[in-house]
Amino acid sequence: MAEPIVIVESLRDWKASLPAMRLVLADDYLSDPAFAEAELHVINLCRSTRYQSLGYYCSLLAEARGHRVLASVATLQDLSRKILYGSEIPALAQYLDTLDDAQRAALPREFNVYLGQCAEPLLAPLARRLFEQFAVPLLHVELRHRQGRVAVAGLRTLSIRSLEAGQVDFLGQALEAHVAQGWRSARKRRPARFDVAMLVDPGDPQPPSNNEALDKFVAAGRRLGLEVETVTRRDFGRLAEFDALFIRETTRLGHHTYAFSRRAEREGLVVMDDPTSILRCTNKVYLAELLTRYKVAAPKACIFGEREVDRLPDLLGFPMVLKAPEGAFSKGVFKAANHAELVEIAARLLDDSELALAQEFMPTEFDWRVGVLGGTALYVCQYAMAGGHWQIVKHGEDGDFSEGDSATLAVEDAPADVVETAVRAANLIGDGLYGVDLKQTADGIRVIEVNDNPSIDAGIEDAVLGDALYDRIMDEFLQRLRRRTRKRARRSA
């Protein structure tokens, strides 16, 4: 049975008698391998859960380790962008509208929710509903009073450091009640039809698909009876008009691509890339932990913060590769040839994030890329290193870039261990569309990373399958839309 633990950044943050469950320091949870092996329910009460903070990484690695965690990184992203939750709050506020005038007038302008409970009895039902939807341990709620009506004006996560001793006591009681009731995840909306929105960025100099490939996706959809329309970030408000979302723009967290994906999922659309895949793939720290947990062969790696930098040479030697948590198309990846370069690059990376990733340097003439869709290998490419460079893409200081040559193979002609390893790694992420990068060395196959938004360019990835590549991807949308329709029909029968 999973043990519940409470993560804090300092024991001094708990300003009352200790709770019944174990308090664990964030640094210990992140660095002690014993926690990675244990079966745990994690309640994250770090001081900050903003993107790339210590608290954020506790939730991120908890998910990579298979621990159940409050709050999830998806929820933290939702609360960081009001555009994602704004349309949901009026439904919750309907409860407040059932109160009479005197009750509404007596409501506070703001209140806290402690694992679904609050100190104001009148607001207890609303506190429960908010916790069921967002599943955040500590939530600060702001109410707006206007013309005799009350609505939820804002939500944000609450730092335990801001609580007084009495509030921490109340939190301890809520913790015990929550654990006694059993774990509750956020209440999910029922997925809500066959028009497909394909999100693109016309101004991106290095998009996941070139214009010819985008046209081929549209044509493939038409052959299958799907109407595929290209949309841009300005079409966010139109998402409900579509039945599916296909993201052909480089994805990032804290970015409109993630907002599109998350909103589309909430609206019941079939989505690629789905928000969970974006969360898991865009952060290299998460991927390193996930591959380690499931014993998928990968370069020797070390997740590091400021205190671990000086240990890296003994662990990995020189040269080593240093990676920002987020990055695409070889951006945010650096090679340190000596201690001075290590210190300088690490300082830059850790200026933006509490943690970064170091990996052993593994030079090869080319990288394998295996496209995986729904758990099946779709295409296999060899990407050669850019001329005079150690990566497949060489970025210049002026923003220009150059790429190495490529060759595409039929899946059945590629080495079986490359394909099998890629599919296994992709399946750890989900059942979407992924590009798995691997290196073939004398010691065997090593997974470099799993990409949620793989390149599919006309003339490269489609060199073997041709138009059939686009047909297979759009047919996956069609089959998922049909399954969703049948499921809804059974529910309403």
Image (tube, grey):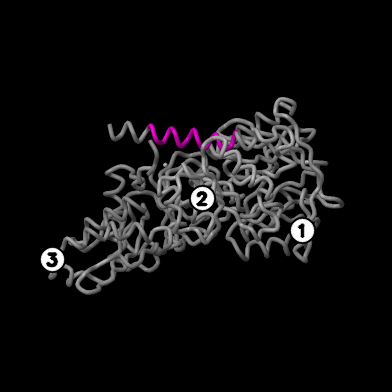
The amino acid type, in three-letter code, at marker 1 is His
Lower position in the chain sequence, tag 3 or tag 1: 3
Q: Amino acid at mark 3?
A: Asp
Rounded to the nearest whole Å, what is the CA distance between mark 2 and mark 3? 43 Å
Magenta span dominant secondary structure = helix
Q: Quadrant of residue 252?
A: bottom right
Which labelled disc corresponds to residue 203? none
Give the CA distance from mark 1 to mark 2.
29 Å
User: What residue is shown at x 62% (from left), y 53% (from top)?
Assistant: 250
The residue singled out by tag 3 in the image is 100
In this rendering, the answer to whether 147 lies above or below 11 is below
Outermost residue toward the right in this view: 388
Q: Nearer the viewer, residue 425 or 53?
A: 425
Q: Position of residue 279 (x, y in %)?
A: 53, 49
Taking the magenta stretch, the answer to whether it contains residue 174 is no
Between discs 2 and 3, the one toward the N terminus: 2
For the residue marked with disc 2, what is the amino acid? Leu
Q: Which image quarter holds the N terminus?
A: top left
Residue 395's label in the rendered image is 1
Name the residue located 23 percent from the left edge and 71 percent from the top edge. Answer: 108
Q: Indicate yes or no whether the magenta region holds residue 473.
A: yes
Magenta part of the protein: which range? Answer: 472-486
